[in-house]
Structure formats: structure tokens, C-alpha cells
Image (cartoon, grey):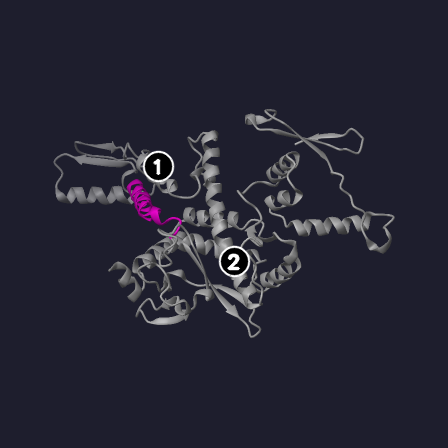
Amino acid sequence: MERLYRQMWIDTERRAMIQQVRTMDAQDGRVKNIHARVARDCIRGGLVLQVNKLSSNTTLKREWEGFKGRLQLDMREKLKSDARGFVMEGNLPLQLVLNEAREVVAAIRMPSETIMPITDMGGRFKDPAAAYEQRDVMTGKTLATWAAWQMALCRLDPDNYDDMGSMGRPFLDACATTWQKLVMTEEDLVIRRRMRAPLRLAHVLEGADETTMTAYRKNVENEKGDITTDFYLNRKGSVSAIQGDAGMGDLADVVHLLDTFYAGSPAPKALFGYTGGLARDILEDLKRDYYDEVDGLQDAAAAGYALAFRIHLLFKGIDPATDEFTLRFATRRTETPNQVADLALKYISMGLPDDMVYADMGLDPDYVRQKKKEQAERNDPYPPAGGKVRPDDKPLAKVSITPGNAPKGESATSISNPGGNGGRGRG
């Protein structure tokens, strides 16, 4: 019954959750920072096409360059907008737009809360020619219909990946209730401080009638603007101070809600400025978990762009195999350039092929090979006849690994120049 209801009307629960997350992002800088940081780390280095078969190298590279330029996938703003929407909404529906030449010229990110997959009870599309519909949020009327190939849909943690009707979830959907409690508690704390923190004075006039009390009160309140106020009494009485709330510094409830909120976020709270009481070793473990989350986001988003590119190739009459090319984001695990270079040197010392090392670094092996060829042509003072480049299989450096010779038991990388000058370096 629930599935049938969702087929007849827009998913109100999903729409309400997406609207709640958007409200959190607009009103709370902590939520905005989480979304912005995850999106920024996800798109680091941009998209890179790695071709696995030399037979289709030239064709795929040419089509990819044109495809990337038309869809603006070489622009950081486009990729960050898609990644940010993916994190906030849990879904990334990319509507493919074709021109008269049957080329994909745009991948428009649609509002995912209005997109409805039309599936049967088994989770398959009822009609692939009308797989997705956009519903009006007020009337439920169908505004547009797309075939399965016209919508590249990325889903974040769906309940059932094989069920095409199971949509993704926003990254912070489980934190929405905790966020509401946190904001409410913080507001109550501010109100409590304003109401109970100031010092108060109790004026006691023994035996004073209403007229005397009123006159005395007016005189005292008129003198409140003075820095120092003296009170003069002509009858038996006293002025005693009433201290403010002694428990004003107790923030245990706020700290608890803050810890609970960040426990459901992809990154530890120390990455966003809350560093109190957190050991460095624990922070390193939490950062690794955050890197794994970013890797998952990169894989899911890159799969959507790869599907759009494959649709483009099919319209061009090209049917590549599933293992013929790989589309990925250049930088993985949010590593620093020094860490990437150190890992590449370790791979070289293990004897891995250069293409595998370049691919793991997020570089295009063919692009690197072409640039090395151009550099050799420029630097060779005696180019061979016919414009051919002399083969140069000599390694640029000799790399060796020294286990246990680095902080925290990591391996150290020793690099020596085989040119004979005896120079050595250590990274």
C-alpha cells in the first residue's frame, strides 16, 4: 500500500526531509560547513577519463573532451553544485539534453524531491520509455516524463540498490531531530542567561505604605543609569543582593547534543573547530572514516557522469565495453600532494607498471606519456631522422623502502639519482 501510494502522489516524507535539510543548511553555519567541505573534498582534482584499451584510446579521448566541455564538467562551480546537491538531497538526478546532432549537450540537475521513478512491485521500471516523472508538489499533476536513458540518477545509500524506486537519503537526515533539539537548547540557554544571570537587589522597607513604596521605587529606578547607586532610607529597612544563577556555566546538555549531532555527520567535529578533549590518535582514525565516506561519494557521482557519457557514446554509434574506460575523480582519500607522491614512489619500488601508478595518482597515463614524449622531443639536441624519439627506458630515480624508519612506524622512501653523482634524497 505504501508503494502504491507513492506511485500516485509525490513522496511527501522525502520532500519534507529535503526541505528540513535545506533549512538547516540556510540557518546553521555548522551544517553549511559540513555540506561545503564534503562537496569540496569530493570534487578535488576534477574528473579524469582513464582508457584501459589502446585500440579505442583516440576516439574515447576525443569524445570525452567534447562531452566534458559541453556539459561544463571542467568547471569547479558545476561539479561543486552537483556534489553539494547530492549530499543535501541524497539523490543526483541529471537530465540529459540532446541537440539535433544527437549529442548530449547538457546534464541539468533536477530537484530530486519532485522526481518519481515509476516502478512495479519488483522494483523494475513499468515502462522504460516513461521511467521517471516530475510531479507538481501542490496538485500532484505530472509535469514531465523521461525515459530511463534520459535521466542519470545517482542515489546515496538507498535502502535497496536493486529497487529502482528506492531513492537515496540526505547525508544528515538522521541528524535532523538532534539538530532541532540542539538549536532549541542553545536558544533556551541564551534566554536563561539574559533572564537569570544579572545581579538583583531586594529593597525591604519595614512598615512602609503604598504611597511611600511607590515614591521610593520611582527614585531608585530613575537612578539605575548611574554606575554606582547609593540608597538612602529614613526608616527601618535593608537592601540585599540576590546572586544570579550559580549553574550558568553548566553546558553538559549542549555538549551532549553537539556530540550526538556530529556523531551522525560524515566528519568528526574536530575538523570543524570543536577540538576540546580529543586525542590526536582518535582524530586520525575518525579522519580515515571521513575519507572513506568521501570516496563513496566520489564513486557514486562519477558513476552518474559515466552513465551520461556512455549514453552519449551510444548515440554516436560507439559501444564501449564495461572495462574499456574508467571515469573517476582525480584525488582520492583527500590526500595531500606529498602523500600522493610518496605512495607513488612506493609503488615504483614494488615494480608496478607506470600506467597503474599514474592511474592511482589520479592522472591520465596517456596524457602523461604524451607530455613526456613532447619533452623528449624538445630536449633532444640530435633528434633522429624521421621525427622518431629515441627510446629511453632508464628510470628517473632508484627508489628503495626503509621499513620502520619514519614516525608512527611508517616506511620511509629513499630516492637516489642513478646518474652517478651520488646525490640522495629522503621523503
Residue hosting label 2: 305
Task: Report whether residue 101 is seen.
Answer: yes
Viewer-nearest residue: 73 or 402:
402
The magenta span reads: 169-194
The amino acid type of the residue labelled 2 equals Tyr
Task: Report whether residue 9 is seen.
Answer: no
Viewer-nearest residue: 369 or 180:
369
At 51% from the left edge and 49% from the top edge, which residue is drawn?
Answer: 42
Q: Which mark is residue 123?
A: none
Instruction: Determine whether the residue tagged by mark 2 lies in a helix, strand or loop.
Output: helix
Looking at the picture, how far across and down is residue 50, in whole percent?
60, 52
Whether the magenta-drawn stretch holds residue 382 is answered as no
Residue hosting label 1: 255
Looking at the picture, how far across and down is residue 239, in whole percent?
23, 33
Looking at the picture, how far across and down is residue 284, in whole percent?
48, 33
Q: Distance between the residues labelled 2 and 1?
A: 41 Å
Viewer-nearest residue: 395 or 425:
395
At 43% from the left edge and 68% from the top edge, which residue is drawn?
Answer: 147
Where residue 400 sits, quadrant-wise, is top right
Q: Which image quadrant: the N terminus?
A: bottom left
Q: Is the magenta stretch mostly helix, strand or loop?
A: helix
Local packing at callout 2 (Cα closer than 10 Å; few below 14, some 14-19, many 20+) is many
Viewer-nearest residue: 353 or 369:
353
The amino acid type of the residue labelled 1 equals Val
